[in-house]
Image (spheres, rainbow, N blue to C red):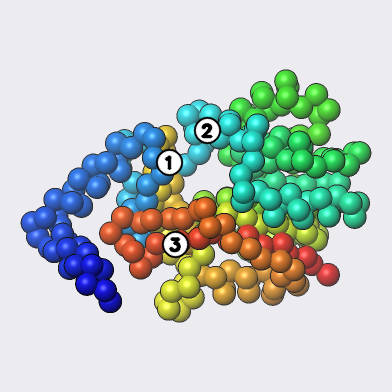
Amino acid sequence: MPLLERAHAALDRLADLPPLGVLRRQRAEAAFASNTDSNLFRGIYPSFEAAQASAPPTRPLGYDNPDAAGMYLERIKRIYPSDYPVIFWLQKLFALGCKTVFDLGGHIGIGYYGYQRYLDYPEGLRWMVSDVPAVMARGADIAIERDPAGRLRFDGNFSGAQGADVLLALGVLQYLPDTLAQRLARLDNPPRHVIINLTPLHLLDNGGQDFFTLQSIGTAFCPYRIAAYGPFLEGFTRLGYQIVDRWQNPDKHCRIAFEPAHSVDVYHGFYLRRG
């Protein structure tokens, strides 16, 4: 290790010792509890419920509130580099005749609006967003003006994925108390095509166990799953899905305060096909 790196490592170890280490953690916790404009993570927990129970009382829990429902409005009008693999596969699936999309965690329809400038949506397209009530209510209001064709719908019941051509899960799986594979296993006719994106996964030597942290999104606190890479994919292959494509989102990361070993440097995306 070069001299400068050794010096930085030594300083980091000193900063974690009492009383400086205690003071740093107290300040970090205060900043986390009062955060209004940053994306922060803290703590390692064995379950969704444990992460949720650790949340400060200063903000609501989850996205089911008006402030959280008002987030991401700018994504209606733009896309990001991480969106291009999703657009690529949607283009191919629409060309093959797919016309029904179940968008799990699609918020107010940000994918539907953002992608339509880059894709030729097929005649008869039905795009169903499934999210929490406050978000879907906001989305339905926006759709009155922005979706005159009436292709966008909202339904919070996962059973709406039954028989859909394509299931999208874009940056949502980390917020679920259960896994997508578990939800798909309960369907008699799950979607043949699944596109997953913006998902944090870990490669820790911990027996293939998922873990949770707590996220502050500025308007609320959210339990946040970091799934084990191998078991995450095995959950789909056991259901008969084939991993057709995989990619990384290098512009996304999860830095958990004081937990460098559990932090995630890149997020992941997959296209899965059944049968």
Residue 67 percent location from the top left of the image: 47, 29
The answer to whether residue 130 is left or right of residue 74 is: right
Residue 182 percent location from the top left of the image: 63, 63
Circle 3 Cα neighbour tier, 10 Å, few/some/many (<14 / 14–19 / ≥20): some
Instruction: Determine the residue positioned at 37% across, 47% down.
Output: 40
In primary-sequence order, the first of circles 2 and 1 is 2
Q: Which residue is mark 2?
A: 71
The answer to whether residue 263 is left or right of residue 272 is: left
Circle 2 Cα neighbour tier, 10 Å, few/some/many (<14 / 14–19 / ≥20): some
Residue 264: which numbered mark, if any? 3
Q: Quadrant of the N terminus?
A: bottom left
Q: Which residue is mark 1?
A: 217
Q: Is residue 182 visible?
A: yes
In primary-sequence order, the first of circles 2 and 3 is 2
The answer to whether residue 127 is left or right of residue 248 is: right
Q: Is residue 241 visible?
A: no
Circle 1 Cα neighbour tier, 10 Å, few/some/many (<14 / 14–19 / ≥20): many
Q: Check disc 3 and give the amino acid type.
A: Val
Q: Secondary structure at mark 2?
A: loop
